[in-house]
Amino acid sequence: MITPVEVLGKELRRGFGYKAVEVDEFLEELAKDYEKVYKENNELREKVSALTENLSHYRTIEESLKRALVLAEETSKETIENANNKAQALEAEASRNAKQLVSEAEDQAEKILTSAKEDFKEEKEQHEKTIENYQKLIRKLESDYQSYKARMKQFINGQMDILDNPVYEMEFEIAGCEQTDGDEEDEQQNNLEMNNKIEICNEGKKAYDIVLRDSFADLLDQMEFLEIEKKKVCIVTESNVAPIYLKEVCELISSKASKTITFSFEAGEKHKQLKTIEALYEELIINHFDRQDLLIALGGGVVGDMTGYAAATYLRGIDFVQVPTTLLSQVDSSIGGKTGVDFLQYKNMVGAFHQPKLVYINTTTLKSLPEREYFSGMGEVIKHGLIKDADYYEWIKENIDAIKAREHEAVKEMIYQSCLIKGGVVERDPKEKGERALLNFGHTLGHAIEKLKDFTWLHGECVAAGCCLAVEISCIKGNISKEEVDDIKGVFEAFDMNGDISELSADDIVKTTKSDKKMVGDKIKFVLLRSVGDAYVDMSVTDDEMKQVLQG
């Protein structure tokens, strides 16, 4: 094989014949370089060939890997899909099982709850019946106790009369003792006394008597234990009562007391203020009243509250007697020793507990009351039945016409029963630490209405409105029925107390309750009914519940 160098040599010799030796030398070196390059080129070709072969191999491997990857991806997707399907199937089955278990548990819980409710209802009815029986028993015992005290007093007095008489006779029959005319008269007197006097005790000791009479004729005898012949007496009254009863009472007291003065102020709630008390203090100071002297409250609730507060605070406390002349004061405010005055527009915000020495009720004073004021007292009377005595409440309903006509026997029985209820409560809780709070039934919203009405409504009218709202809340709480609510409202309406407060704002009324003295922190001690004749204190009444009944 002729190499390119040999071809070049021939051409060079032909062209450069005179330099053949030099050409040969050049060609020899060029041949060596060519051989070297040729050899390197062959080696390079071999390497390229090897690389090409390797590349082909790697491409084959790459294709195999790609096919394997595709296969793996397809297999993985199928596996994942199968796993997902299986997981979903398991989840669905678990959900069905869980729902079935929950449903079975709910059914079982419902059965248990229904059974528990039935058991609770039955137990509650039994307890309520037991409580009702106990309440009836307590009322009977209270009545029997008052009767027993009156009879014992008469018995003791009778025994003393017998001892003073050297000769007395007792007539007997074979069947037993024969009752003489004198015995019949004594029994009638005992029964009369039993229904005309109630003894109020405090911590087991007698505090005072509530005496019911048909005139003022017995006032001095009932005050005999006070020895007023050794005392100065101030009769406190107001401008409506003074022209009717002050002269009679003053003449009676003046006939026995060492000195008698009177203090009269302008009638009305707006004068139930500290400045009126200050004027009374000044009158007492000018007349040199000391701690041994006595005040007499002749009038309604305002007079009684203010006289009691003056007595509680003058010289750190002197005695006083209540002679209430309105229905509301006779059945409520004169009993229990709550005294006080209004402060600015806040009802009874300043006061003290100070028990009277006697409550003397002349029931005939009710004949001089205007009808509206007489009916107003029924707000407290009806309240007594609602909170403590369902039978008394029914009696009130049955005797509405007689009460409205002011029939003597009906009115006297009503006053006596209300005094028994109020007296029993204040005996057990004189400082309002528990049960006495029940007497505030109707008063939380009632006092707010009274303030917002600027005292143009009488107190009993406001209490009646508050009672009607309280029974509606009791109905919301599930305690009493709608029919009972309507029945109670109907009784109040029978005495012209319909509780129409449509012109007042519900928000304003609720806001005003926050200034009530019965607040405990930010909670109101709201009195509600469990049933007619059974009241309780509820601290859970909300603003929304109050607004609901206020907005009708």
Image: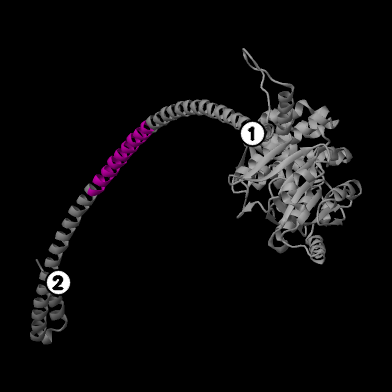
Task: Determine the residue located farthest toward the top in the rendered image.
Answer: 174
The range drawn in magenta is: 65-94
**The C terminus is located in which quarter?**
top right
Q: Residue at x 17, y 62 (%)?
A: 48
Q: Amino acid at mark 1?
A: Met
Instruction: Provide residue 430's location: percent of width, then percent of height.
Output: 63, 47
Give the labeled residue for mark 1.
152
Give the labeled residue for mark 2.
4
Neighbor class of circle 1 (other Cα within 10 Å; few <14, some 14-19, many 20+) is few
Residue 102 against residue 11 in the figure, above or below: above
Q: Secondary structure at mark 1?
A: helix
Residue 535 falls left or right of residue 95: right
Q: How many marks?
A: 2
Is 73 included in the stretch rendered in magenta? yes
Residue 44 falls left or right of residue 524: left
Q: Amino acid at mark 2?
A: Pro
Q: Secondary structure at mark 2?
A: helix
Instruction: Provide residue 537's location: percent of width, then percent of height.
Output: 61, 43
Neighbor class of circle 2 (other Cα within 10 Å; few <14, some 14-19, many 20+) is few
Instruction: Provide residue 207's location: percent of width, then percent of height.
Output: 65, 47
Residue 443 against residue 40 in the figure, above or below: above
**Which of the two residues, 89 or 443, is positioned nearer the viewer here?**
443
